[in-house]
Amino acid sequence: MSENECEIGATVEDVFAILTDGWSYAAWVVGASRIRDVDPPWPDPEGRIHHSIGAWPFLLSDTTVSLEHEPARKLRLRVRVWPFGDGEVEFRGYETPTGCRLVMTEQMTNGPIAMLPSALADLVLHPRNAETLRRLKLLAEKAS
């Protein structure tokens, strides 16, 4: 499992407003290039984001499914990032005196990365997730 965290100068509510806006997904998720659709009951369980990964003309269509949502506290997702595999990503938000501390954990559950020892998988996931949180931070701090 890989874990990253980030201090954000915005409220937990502002951060989760971005996290739960399915149409903003490609703006902060590394690898997502466009959103094709967002199905209700997103962000509640079983809601889906239909997205593409890659760059034209090499786009792959994929989906992300909400598994659990606690407003302004927690969002747990099943992500598909083929050809690399499937995984579960969880975001937890905590209020701080200056805004929000956001913790992101990712565990690959299927595919090539899931077969790697945890330390090797973390070498792949940690930098990608650090950039994802950096992008999310920029969006949240700009909005607040």
Image: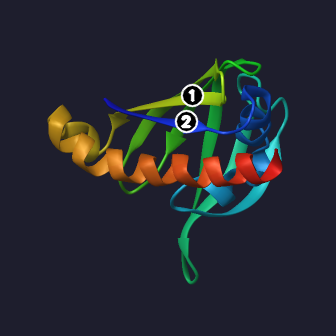
Q: Secondary structure at mark 1?
A: strand
96 left or right, relative to 14? left
**Alpha-carbon span between mark 2 and mark 1:** 5 Å
Quadrant of the image occupied by residue 18: top right
Residue at 82 percent across and 49 percent down: it is 143
Label 1 Cα crowd, 10 Å radius (few <14 / some 14-19 / many 20+) = many
Label 2 Cα crowd, 10 Å radius (few <14 / some 14-19 / many 20+) = some
Q: Is residue 8 above or below residue 53?
A: above
* Residue type at the position of mark 2: Glu
Q: Is residue 34 above or below residue 74?
A: below
User: Residue 108's x, y, as percent?
Assistant: 35, 35
Q: How is the image coloured?
A: rainbow
Farthest right residue?
A: 40
User: In which quadrant will I find the C terminus?
Assistant: top right
Label 2 close to label 1 by CB (< 8 Å): yes
User: Residue 89's x, y, as percent?
Assistant: 50, 32
* Residue type at the position of mark 1: Arg
Earlier in the chain: of badge 2 and badge 1, it is 2
| Count of number-bearing discs | 2
User: In which quadrant will I find the N terminus?
Assistant: top left
The numbered dot on residue 7 is 2
Residue at 71 percent across and 22 percent down: it is 45
State the residue in front, 5 or 62: 5
State the residue in front, 92 or 81: 92
User: Residue 100's x, y, as percent?
Assistant: 64, 29
Farthest front residue?
A: 97
Q: Is residue 72 above or below residue 135?
A: above
User: Residue 8's x, y, as percent?
Assistant: 62, 38
Q: Secondary structure at mark 2?
A: strand
Residue matched to label 1 = 101
Farthest bottom residue?
A: 57
